[in-house]
Image (tube, rainbow, N blue to C red):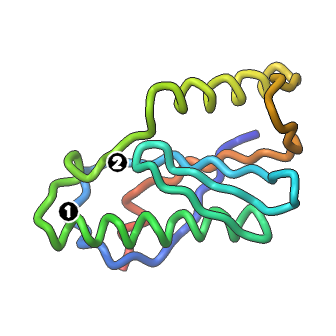
Amino acid sequence: MEPATMQFESRLPRDWMPDGASVLVLVRMNDEGVWESIVPDFNIAGRGDSANDGLVNALELLDDYLSLCVAEGKSFAEAQRPVSVGFRFSILSELLALAAGRKIPRRRQRARRDCEYKIPLRLVGVA
């Protein structure tokens, strides 16, 4: 599946983000039929009734968090707060299993209707 790109309205100042910066948002459907999303580089998670709703929720939460960082005088690099190495490993394991067309055994089986969105962060900054 090729990554999707979308526009998102943001309150961030355009010059605050480095040129070419992007953020990875992963979206998948859980066992209850709710779409979950995660932004691993900022440790932010969202949810929604559709993949797009989950994505938009994660982006809204990311925008809120980054806006607070701007108000506190933090740089883009200082704003990053990645998930733990162990959690990154579990995400990578799931992605590799999906790419290979198999499931990894885990405590709860989830649907394999997963989506990946690579969103240029500069688009998040469009006012």
- Which disc, if any, is residue 21? 2
Q: Considering only vertical position in the picture, is 50 above or below 40?
A: below
Amino acid type assigned to the residue bearing label 1 in the image: Trp
* Mark 1 lies on residue: 16
Q: Splitting the image into 4 quarters, where does residue 121 fall?
A: bottom left
Q: Considering only vertical position in the picture, is 70 above or below 98?
A: below
Q: Give how far apart the Cα atoms at labels 2 and 1 are.
A: 11 Å
Q: Are marks 2 and 1 in contact (CB under 8 Å)?
A: no
Q: Relative to residue 46, is residue 63 drawn left or right?
A: left
Q: Position of residue 84 (x, y in %)?
A: 44, 33
Q: Position of residue 58 (x, y in %)?
A: 55, 63
**The residue tagged with tag 2: helix, strand or loop?**
loop
Q: Position of residue 90 (x, y in %)?
A: 62, 28
- Which disc, if any, is residue 93? none
Q: Relative to residue 44, is residue 10 drawn left or right?
A: left
- Give the residue drawn at x 38%, y 72%: 64
Label 2 CA crowd tier, 10 Å (few <14, some 14–19, many 20+): few
Q: Position of residue 115 (x, y in %)?
A: 73, 47
Q: Splitting the image into 4 quarters, where does residue 82 fall?
A: top left
